Image (spheres, rainbow, N blue to C red):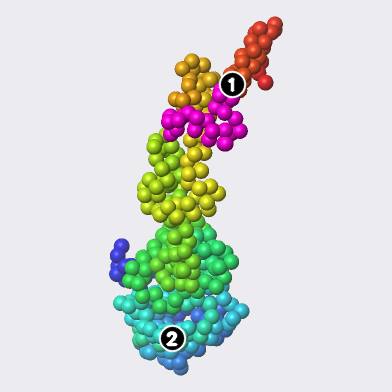
Amino acid sequence: MNSSGAMVNLASAPLGSRLIETDDVESMVDELGTMMAEASVKASRVKEVGGVVDGLEADGLSMMRITYGDARIRLDAIHDPAVDDYLAISLPVVGGMSVDYKGASFRSAVDSSAFIKSPGGQLTLELEPGVTYVMIMLAMSDVRRFAARTVAPEDETYGLDFHSELSSSVVVDTLVNQAEFLRNLANAPHDLGNRGLSAMQAVLLREQIMTTLLLGHDHSLRGQMERRERRQGKRSAILDAASLMSARAGQAIGVEFIAREVGLSMRGLHAGFRREFDQSPKQFLTRLRMERARADLEVGVEAGDAQLRIADVARRWGYPQANRFAAVYREHFGELPSATIARSHSVNARRAVFTRVVCDRPGDGRVETS
């Protein structure tokens, strides 16, 4: 469904339960203030204009649709510093409102922007006649925990705050469609005939909404996110380089070639390998080649390869000169390739003697192992 269709449904289709219906706007605002845990919410004195509030609530997620009558109304909300565990996203679906909050003044309306209220600050709203808006509410502690899992270290999320004006049409449309999806799920009959949102659905929808805000809207962790993305991008390139070395260790490749292939400078490649593996790229590649050369020598002896030659193994892993190969091999393993072959022969011989002794032992014919 496109966002315009979703807005039509959000404006008038069933949404949870009727929470407030009154002809006294001041009474309605008082009750809303209690729901929102504000210390004080005051309306301009327009007693002849009432309103309706419908809403639904699930674990860590709630949504209300608030409709005011045909009069211009001013709301002043004074925040209680002791109550700070909520984030409210107001999406106008009919008409609009003027917002003055945390130093920003703007109009939030169907054709312009949405409005986000986070903890702190004094809020003034000028509601246009007949305005209807949908308010999605999350626990701010849940948003911070989600941010700590996804975009920034936990100790950096305590100051998380969102810019109050949400002007991106893409993000607003996404939130409108998520709100309509939430409304549909909450009002759809379940298998047992009851209505309501399951805990699993609430968790998934809550994380969808939080992801939309963290990725698409301006907030205080934006800089940390971008730095983390750059670090992860560099780490991905280093892992790509390591994978490339592993796949092509037997070929005549050098560090310059690897850097070009993964799009890093030589300096960036060296710094990344030091960070990830505590080795230079050349040391990493040499270690790969030596480990594979030793495996070839040991496997060749075990298989009884009569044609096994150290020079052949050396060339296979990028060393045309056997003497140079032997020197590097000894640096890594503390023995020459010939010593590895001799040791492998000795191990094979002991294994053969052990097998003969066990198999030749009188008994019930079973082969014993240890």
Q: Position of residue 298 (x, y in %)?
A: 54, 24
Residue under pointer 1: 342
Q: Which mark is residue 100?
A: 2
Mark 1 or mark 2: whose residue is earlier in sequence? 2
Residue 119: image x %, image y %? 53, 77
- The answer to which image quadrant residue 46 occupies is bottom left
Quadrant, the N terminus? bottom left
Q: Is residue 242 magenta?
A: no
Find the magenta span and give its range.
314-341
Q: Amino acid at mark 2?
A: Asp
Query: Residue 170 in the image: x percent, y percent?
Result: 33, 68
Secondary structure beneath label 1: helix
Q: Nearer the viewer, residue 271 or 207?
A: 271
Note whether residue 192 is visible.
no
Report the magenta stretch's main SS: helix
| Comparing labels 1 and 2, the label whose residue is closer to the camera | 1
Is residue 43 at all visible to an observer of this figure? yes
Residue shown at the point (58%, 82%) measured from the top left:
80
The verdict on residue 330 being magenta is: yes
Kind of residue indicated by mark 1: Ala
Binning the other alpha carbons within 10 Å of mark 1 as few (below 14), some (14 to 19) or many (20 upward) gives some
Q: Secondary structure at mark 2?
A: strand
Q: Nearer the viewer, residue 153 or 94?
A: 153
